[in-house]
Image: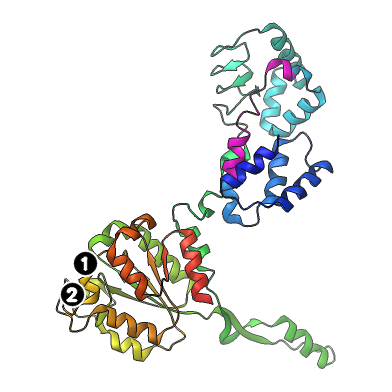
Amino acid sequence: MLIGLFQSLREARVPVTLREWLDLMAALQADFAFADIEGFHALARTILVKDERHYDRFDRAFGEFFAGVERVEADMLAQVPEDWLREGFRRQLSEEERTRIESLGGLDALMQAFRERLHEQNERHAGGNRWIGTGGTSPFGAAGFHPGGIRVGPRGGGRMAAKVWEQRPYRNLDGDAELGPRNIKLALRRLRRFAREGAPEELDLDGTIAATARDGGLLDIRLRPQRRNAVKLLLFLDIGGSMDEHVRVCEELFGAARSEFRRLEHFYFHNFLYDHVWTDNLRRESARIPTVDLLRRYTPDHKIVFVGDAAMGPYEITHAGGSVEYWNEEPGALWMQRLRERFSKLAWINPSPRERWAWTPSIQLVRELVADQMYALTPQGLTEAMRALAR
């Protein structure tokens, strides 16, 4: 039966290998998870999933595969040892629920009533307050509510026995999930190079111990500069036009980048890079910075990141005067070439869906100009871009 779970995980693009599957089988033979579906879920995820980005995919595949497991027929329940049921019920109950059960006469009385109902009932019931069914107020059933009952079947209306894989707490770690501040920061953290800099204000424990030992036990406190991310990043943001529909996600990306990189400089451009950029979009005429100044001011160890959908007329890239805002003396392609010659680490982040890229000529031009270092604005795309910049 469980080989189907292995196939479901592979279909859900969870990278599970045969070696890991054999390890799970060995753990089951050693009784690490016996007659406990939630215990098996935790055990399987621990053994089979190597990256937290795949936790949500695992939970979805697990839930789909075991969707019918909880639909237990009465004759099957009658064959389940009572101590298994009793232990399972106790584990799911909170202190408040135990108190409510006591009001019905205790767990033994509830189990006895449950057995009697199984024996008497011979058809499906919905609603009501006595039989095992759905949507009612009986102590037994599903999709209804009773403060001290037993759920039989799939998800209950009161959500008092929610399955852990349906809660999906890792949904925003999926590489294909919608972007949010949390997974943007997780992706940006792939680009880190730590260095100690600034005033010596952090306790150097190893240095203090060594100095104290050298002084014969006389305490000699040593301090050192704090460890900080030493990556230097220049962020260029496309603003206006077709980028208006991507404002929210670009704001989140910008906010996450500012919190992750202390040495961050940002600039705005429209559609493509020409002979100037600006730092304040409200004062774009008076806050212009010549692109040639950037080439002179910043050292080659700076990382360059462009954020834009690269959707424009191809002539805006290849021809002088191609800018839609003013007459540019030199084509944008020439300025991008100069930037790449100065800074070897460059990536272009594209917020438009990847399936559109092949059908947009300007995107293909930009990909060629940045040596195919274009990445989608998704958690997986950001992770790939940060890895490329970190090489």
Where does residue 155 sit, x and y in percent of width and height? 58, 29
Left-right relation of 50 to 313 = right
Count of residue discs = 2
Q: Is residue 306 above or below residue 90?
A: below
Q: For label 2, count other residues whose C-alpha is less than 10 Å away and answer few (under 14), some (14-19) or many (20+).
A: many
Looking at the rendered structure, which numbered label has been put on residue 313?
A: 1
Residue sitting farthest toward the bottom = 215
- Name the amino acid type tagged 2: Gly
Q: Residue at x 56, y 48 (%)?
A: 56
Span colored in magenta: 59-77
SS class of the residue under badge 1? loop
Q: For label 1, count other residues whose C-alpha is less than 10 Å away and answer few (under 14), some (14-19) or many (20+).
A: some
Q: Is residue 237 magenta?
A: no
Picture colour scheme? rainbow
Residues at marks 1 and 2, CA–CA distance in whole angstroms:
8 Å
Name the residue tied to disc 2: 322
Left-right relation of 274 to 2 = left
Between discs 1 and 2, the one toward the N terminus: 1
Q: Is residue 169 visible?
A: no
Q: Is residue 6 visible?
A: yes
SS class of the residue under badge 2? loop
Q: Residue at x 50, y 79 (%)?
A: 231
Residue 336 or residue 18, whichever sits in front = 18
- Name the amino acid type tagged 1: Gly
Quadrant of res 367: bottom left
Where does residue 352 sit, x and y in percent of width and height? 34, 58
Q: Is residue 61 magenta?
A: yes
Q: Is residue 71 above or below residue 344?
A: above
Left-right relation of 249 to 86 = left
Q: Is residue 208 above or below residue 163?
A: below
Residue 40 or residue 84, whichever sits in front = 40
